[in-house]
Amino acid sequence: MEKFITLTGLAVPLDRANVDTDAIIPKQFLKSIKRTGFGPNLFDEWRYLDHGEPGMDNSRRPVNPDFVLNQPRYRGAQVLLARENFGCGSSREHAPWALEDYGFRAIIAPSYADIFYNNCFKNGLLPIVLDAESVDRMFRETEENTGYKLAIDLPAQTVTTPGGQTFSFKVDAFRKYCLLNGLDDIVLTLQNVDKIKAYEARRKVEAPWLFS
């Protein structure tokens, strides 16, 4: 997965609380496990005016002009501002896949559902928790200022607004290490590939009947 060290990215405000994973990526798109290709269907039921299904040509679908991601001023956003309990509902890992495939690298919210929060780190997304008052301020400033970009520094664990105000956030040390180095669970496991091979070779000698 891609390393996350620093990011200065356009912010987009999704002013809804309790956004569940079925809203992030509806259930009909869960047939694929390729991790890619989900971006066009992120928030599908809110972005489009028709019902989406896998294989549809999204470029031909009628879009909802009132939905924030469809507004030209937020095109290319990399930071998603959200409200409390973001990512609630089912545990589908497709939700962070869709957010990452769309182009988001970080989310800022007062709180997240636990499983979604954990899945973000495993897929290169940085879910930042800030208090509701600070998030409110970013919502207001984003809506009032076109081109509003936030500077996120993971080593320093800070978010800085265009006006220069800096907010600190907490992150687990191991999760931070993995993001800084682009290490997902598979890459972490492969770092011990020599030990794994040695164990398998030893087990074939100790218990050959398991391998017949």
Image (tube, helix red, strand yellow):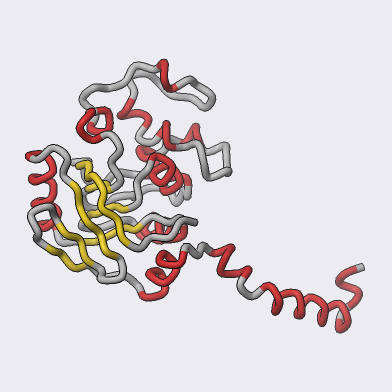
Q: Residue at x 37, y 75 (%)?
A: 173
Picture coordinates of residue 186, whole percent (x, y): 59, 63
User: 161 or 64, which is in the foreground?
Assistant: 161
Residue 51 in the figure: left or right of residue 161: right
Q: Which residue is drawn at 47% across and 45% down?
A: 94
Q: Residue at x 87, y 79 (%)?
A: 207
When the figure is inspected, residue 106 is found, relative to residue 180, above or below; the finding is above
Picture coordinates of residue 40, whole percent (x, y): 42, 31
When the figure is inspected, residue 129 is found, relative to residue 76, above or below; the finding is below
Picture coordinates of residue 85, whole percent (x, y): 26, 53
Q: Residue at x 57, y 38 (%)?
A: 32
The number of numbered badges drawn on the structure is: 0
Determine which quarter of the picture holds residue 113: bottom left
* The C terminus - image quarter: bottom right
User: 82 or 37, which is in the foreground?
Assistant: 37
Residue 47 in the figure: left or right of residue 41: left
When the figure is inspected, residue 199 is found, relative to residue 119, above or below; the finding is below
Picture coordinates of residue 41, whole percent (x, y): 42, 32
Determine which quarter of the picture holds residue 59: top left
Determine which quarter of the picture holds residue 190: bottom right
